[in-house]
Image (cartoon, rainbow, N blue to C red):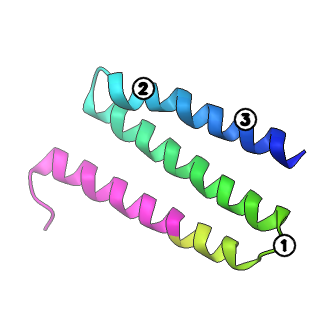
Amino acid sequence: MFDIAATVITLAAVLVLYRAIKGPRVYDRALAVNIIGTKTVVLLALIGFAYGRPHFLDIALVYALMNYISTLAFLKYREMGRLD
């Protein structure tokens, strides 16, 4: 069951990678990169659950926060041209 879930999540991330590369606008690309980051968080949580390693959930939470903050910073920089 783990293999199927991991394969589906990875396949979904690869499909979103197309949007990140070919997105018509910068905002579509930013959203695609954010979705890939979210799928990575889910995959890390799934690996932690499957192998009985609870510290993977901590890593997934830190990665989720970094993904969120970097997306906000990128979009603010794109909108205003500065980060202050």
- Left or right: where does residue 73 sit relative to residue 5? left
Residue denoted by label 2: 19
Residue 10, image x, y percentages: 64, 39
Callout 3: SS:
helix
Residue denoted by label 1: 52
Residue 8 lies in the magenta-colored region: no
Residue type at mark 3 is Val
Residue 24, image x, y percentages: 29, 20
10 Å crowding of disc 3: few (<14), some (14-19), many (20+): few
Residue denoted by label 3: 8
Residue 78 lies in the magenta-colored region: yes
Identify the magenta region: 63-84
Residue drawn at 54 percent across, 27 percent down: 15
Position of residue 69 relative to residue 29, above or below, is below
Pointer 2 or 3: first along the chain: 3
Residue drawn at 26 percent across, 52 percent down: 74
- Left or right: where does residue 36 sit relative to residue 50? left
The quadrant in which residue 51 appears is: bottom right
